[in-house]
Amino acid sequence: MKLKTKDLLTLNELGKSELLGIIDDAIKMKKDLKKGVSKPLLKNKTLAMIFQKPSTRTRVSFETGMFQLGGHALNLSADELQLKRGETIEDTAKTLSRYVDLIMARVYSHDELELLAKNSPVSVINGLSDSFHPCQILADLMTIKEKKKKLAGLKLAWIGDGNNVCSSMIYGCAKTGISISIATPKGYEPNPDVIKASSKLTEVKMSNHPETAVNGADIVVTDTFVSIHHQTTDRTNDFLPRFQVNSSLMKKANPSAIFMHCLPAKRGQEVTSEVIDGPQSVVWDEAENRLHAQKALMVALLRRV
Ligand code: CP
Ligand code: NVA
């Protein structure tokens, strides 16, 4: 798979066939890895990973992925770069691009990521901003394809905060023909521009009723009520108890529905232990698939037309 876009910041940059191609490549790479086959497709390539915020999955999956592809990843905490002392994002982008082949950044502000991408001749990947989390949704769509053997025609329910992960999920559903029903408390709806653009491609339903959203759903998804960029605000009272994914809510979905969560999870808040540790949960496959999906993404970005 070759891509037209230089950067992956939201997921909306990818055409439908590009997105489906990355998912298929990722599934193939996963099968190959399990058979002990790992091709050095990124030999002598270097990835810079900038982290303004903590991470477990993103950091380890990108670094391991680069290693498996024969390349190298540099873990750069933003606090240890000259950014901390006031060097601009623009100058950081121009400098890093002289050394590395790819940049992945986890930032607070999506505007900073756009600035980074605009000033980097090399590809920039969003490793989570306050607005989007495209790599998570690549892994999520891959997981759905593995579990359900298809994407188009499925129904996905998003319960809780209409946050960064939700926005990339809406784009992902729109491009793959999954219909999405989102239930949030009032005031926590996703970005209206994302909904408007995606509604042209798939059914996007919005409500404040989790039971309605999960009715007939093949996939039930939630995320933390308090994202990293919200950490100073206590928002949980606006969500509990109605927006918790528990067994009683899961029973209202399709009996074969799977439960997904990007992790890290707060058991007893957005999801109960019974659900996340129960038979319908696919969260560990979902976490593993970050590795495979991002390997396919990095290879595709470096092969771009
Ligand atoms: N899901 C996810 O991005 O996890 P990390 O914050 O651990 O990277
Ligand atoms: N919405 C969460 C996702 C973490 C992977 C956050 O932004 O903190």
Image (cartoon, helix red, strand yellow):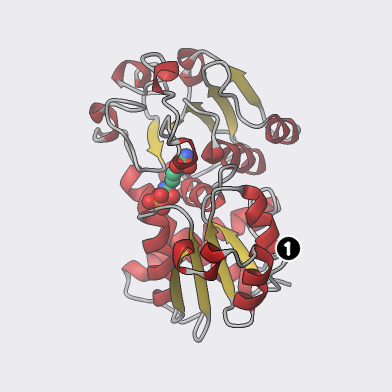
- Taking the image as drawn, is residue 27 in sight? no
Could you tell me which quadrant the N terminus lies in? bottom right
Name the side, left or right, on which 268 lies relative to 173: left
* Residue at point 32%, 21% (across, down): 246
Could you tell me which quadrant the C terminus lies in? bottom right
- The image shows residue 83 at horizontal and vertical percentages of 56, 65
Check the image and report above or below for 38 versus 269: below
Name the side, left or right, on which 136 lies relative to 114: left
Q: Nearer the viewer, residue 246 or 91?
A: 91
The quarter of the displayed image where residue 234 is located? top left
Q: Residues within 10 Å of mark 1 (few under 14, many from 20)?
A: some
- The image shows residue 39 at horizontal and vertical percentages of 45, 79
Check the image and report above or below for 283 versus 186: below
The quarter of the displayed image where residue 153 is located? top right
Q: Nearer the viewer, residue 38 or 186?
A: 186
- Taking the image as drawn, is residue 205 in sight? yes
Check the image and report above or below for 20 versus 244: below
- The image shows residue 171 at horizontal and vertical percentages of 64, 41
* Residue at point 40%, 61% (across, down): 59
Marks counted in the figure total 1
Q: Nearer the viewer, residue 204 or 30?
A: 204
What's the amino acid at mark 1?
Answer: Lys
Q: Which residue is mark 1?
A: 118
